[in-house]
């Protein structure tokens, strides 16, 4: 049988699978003022409703589901590895095929921190991904950039962290993961699959 490259959906984590945390008006992360951040404590980690079901729907439609998440707050000392591990234990219980985490800070010059495509490149070494029939789902301009670099279709989920002046136009903008999944399945999966 001919070997066919797989279709994938690359998912961002914070603002896509789980709620962001409102830090109020005087929060600085690595010298930048930010209001909404990733969870820093396990107790802050809360998945959106029906995430598991949405991921399962993608898999049933023939996609592999790959999480690719930046966690620079590990490098900035805001998220301790113990909390990170507990959070990721919950994440690993979701129907995901693979998980990639960039733990580096902005100034470390790694190749994996989105918008660099390092995590997607690592993924395709393992999974042989057909990027042009794959999707990136994220809530920031950085996610959209990564998807565009790899020639994936891009779906932006509006979250409190979404930049309003994003110049990398996503292919689609939706309100949540469920809508993103419905869009993919209804418009990009042949009927009868
Ligand atoms: Mg995000
Ligand atoms: Zn990295």
Image (cartoon, rainbow, N blue to C red):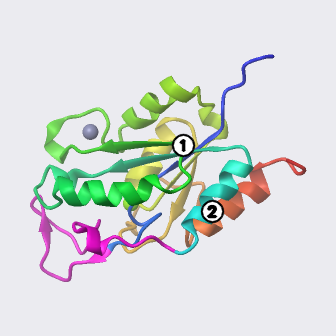
Q: Which span of residues is magenta-colored?
A: 21-48
Residue 75 magenta-drawn?
Answer: no
Which badge, 2 or 1, is on the more N-terminal residue?
A: 2
Does the Cβ of the disc 1 residue fall within 8 Å of ligand 1?
no
Give above or below for 127 relative to 180. Answer: above
Please give the name of the residue rendered at 37% of the width and 50% of the height, measured from the top-left corner: 69
Residue 44 sits in quarter: bottom left
- Specify whether residue 170 is in view: yes
Which element type, helix, strand or loop, lies under badge 1? loop
Q: Are marks 2 and 1 in contact (CB under 8 Å)?
A: no
Residue 27 located left or right of residue 66: left
Q: Position of residue 59 (x, y in %)?
A: 67, 49
Give above or below for 17 relative to 154. Answer: below
Please give the name of the residue rendered at 59% of the width and 34% of the height, measured from the top-left corner: 131
Q: Position of residue 130 (x, y in %)?
A: 63, 31
For mark 1, what is the residue? 97
Give neighbour class at mark 1: few <14, some 14-19, many 20+ (Cα, 10 Å). Answer: some
Which residue is farthest right? 192
- Specify whether residue 173 is in view: no
Residue 116 sits in quarter: top left
Q: Position of residue 159 (x, y in %)?
A: 43, 72
For mark 2, what is the residue? 54
Residue 62 located left or right of residue 99: right
Please give the name of the residue rendered at 73% of the width and 50% of the height, measured from the top-left corner: 60
Q: Quadrant of the N terminus?
A: top right
- Front-most of 57 and 162? 57
Q: Position of residue 32 (x, y in %)?
A: 14, 63
Which element type, helix, strand or loop, lies under badge 2? helix
- Rendered image: mark on residue 193: none
Residue 74 located left or right of residue 101: left
């Amino acid at each position: 049988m001919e070997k066919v490259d797989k279709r994938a959906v690359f998912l961002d984590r914070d603002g896509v699978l789980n709620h962001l945390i409102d830090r109020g008006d005087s929060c600085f992360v690595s010298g930048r003022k930010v209001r909404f951040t990733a969870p820093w404590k396990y107790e802050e980690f809360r998945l959106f409703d029906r995430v598991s079901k949405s991921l399962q729907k993608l898999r049933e439609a023939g996609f592999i589901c790959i999480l690719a998440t930046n966690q620079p707050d590990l490098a900035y000392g805001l998220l301790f590895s113990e909390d990170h591990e507990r959070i990721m234990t919950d994440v690993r219980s979701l129907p995901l095929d693979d998980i990639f985490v960039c733990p580096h800070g902005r100034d470390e010059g790694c190749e994996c921190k989105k918008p660099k495509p390092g995590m997607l490149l690592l993924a395709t070494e393992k999974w042989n991904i057909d990027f042009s029939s794959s999707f990136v789902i994220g809530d920031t301009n950085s996610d959209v950039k990564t998807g565009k670099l790899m020639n994936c279709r891009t779906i932006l989920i509006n979250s409190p962290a979404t930049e309003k002046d994003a110049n990398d136009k996503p292919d689609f903008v939706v309100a949540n993961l469920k809508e993103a999944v419905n869009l993919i399945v209804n418009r990009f999966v042949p009927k009868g699959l």
